[in-house]
């Protein structure tokens, strides 16, 4: 069943109204009619089974049939910090990372990032990523839309790390040395409701000075198995590991 995220003021008691791009999707793409049902989700995560009662020129209106008790989110909040990669790789990370349960995405300007976003492009690119996150959250039946931040500096990232219970760095040199215990140890220790910030470098990886600064700030470097993963693959491996440990084994 199709799912849409609505703002708080789109609801009035047990009625709702949908406009904008979602109105277009409902009427032109899905070709829904009065009597059709859909899932509407409030910003704080409450989902409701709803029925369309009226389709006007620019608004879909309907009523709530029942509020649902869904639990589709990872039991811990995982933030994915990605050194700005080339091309559309960040879009891929946001889309697939949303499907796998990431709570937020933090792009950052790494020493080896080839691409540079000027302020005007950063706003448009972030808006694009936010739209991708919303659509992926609807497709994967999430109850929240992950937040996508504007690109940060490494210093900003260090500062953000103070808000998290656990902080890991995916570092290929640790994988080459055969390090296998750090990620597993954190996933055994982390408890539901806690938070994890996971840092990934761009295509060229993080340089040693960046690793040193992060470790000084309390981050822990770890390997992700014996194979060296691409910048767009590593975050998905990490999120899958979190899901396996905290959802499938418990």
Image: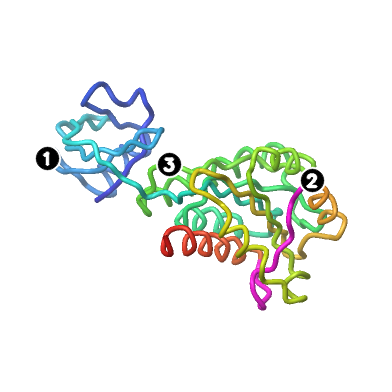
Place of residue 203 in the rendered image (x, y in percent of width and height, measured from the top left)? 72, 64
Q: Which residue is mark 3?
A: 144
In this picture, which residue range is highlighted in magenta? 217-230
| Mark 3 Cα shell of 10 Å, populated few (<14), some (14-19), many (≥20) | many
**Residue at the image position 66 percent from the left and 64 percent from the top:** 231
Q: Which disc is residue 216 wearing?
A: none
Location of the C terminus by quadrant is bottom left
Disc 1/disc 2 C-alpha distance (Å): 55 Å
Q: Position of residue 34 (x, y in %)?
A: 13, 38
User: What percent of the width, then of the height, locates residue 149?
Assistant: 62, 40
| 71 part of magenta stretch | no
Residue 35, which numbered label? 1
- The alpha-carbon separation of the residues under discs 3 and 2 comes to 30 Å
Dot 3 or dot 2, earlier in sequence? 3
Residue nearest the observer in this picture, 246 or 153: 246
Question: What colour scheme was applied to this rendering of the protein?
Answer: rainbow
């Amino acid at each position: 069943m199709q799912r849409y995220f609505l703002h708080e003021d789109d609801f009035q008691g047990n009625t709702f109204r949908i406009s904008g791009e979602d109105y277009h999707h409902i009427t032109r793409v899905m070709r829904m009619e009065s009597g059709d049902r859909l899932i509407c989700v409030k910003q704080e995560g409450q989902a409701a089974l709803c029925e369309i009662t009226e389709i006007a020129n620019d608004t879909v209106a309907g009523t709530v049939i029942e509020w649902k008790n869904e639990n589709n989110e990872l039991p811990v909040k995982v933030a994915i910090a990605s050194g700005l990669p080339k091309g559309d790789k960040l879009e891929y990370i946001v889309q697939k990372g949303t499907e796998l349960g990431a709570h937020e995405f933090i792009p950052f300007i790494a020493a080896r990032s080839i691409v540079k976003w000027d302020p005007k492009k950063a706003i448009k690119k972030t808006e694009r990523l936010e739209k991708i996150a919303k659509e992926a959250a609807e497709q994967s039946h999430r109850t929240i839309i992950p937040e996508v931040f504007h690109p940060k500096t490494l210093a900003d990232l260090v500062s953000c790390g103070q808000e998290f219970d656990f902080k890991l760095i995916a570092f290929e040199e640790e994988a080459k040395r055969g390090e296998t215990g750090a990620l597993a140890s954190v996933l055994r220790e982390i408890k539901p409701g806690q938070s994890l910030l996971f840092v990934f470098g761009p295509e060229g990886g993080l340089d040693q000075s960046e690793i040193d600064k992060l470790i000084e700030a309390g981050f822990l470097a770890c390997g992700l198995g014996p194979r060296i993963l691409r910048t767009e693959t590593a975050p998905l491996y990490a999120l899958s590991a979190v899901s396996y440990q905290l959802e499938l084994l418990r």
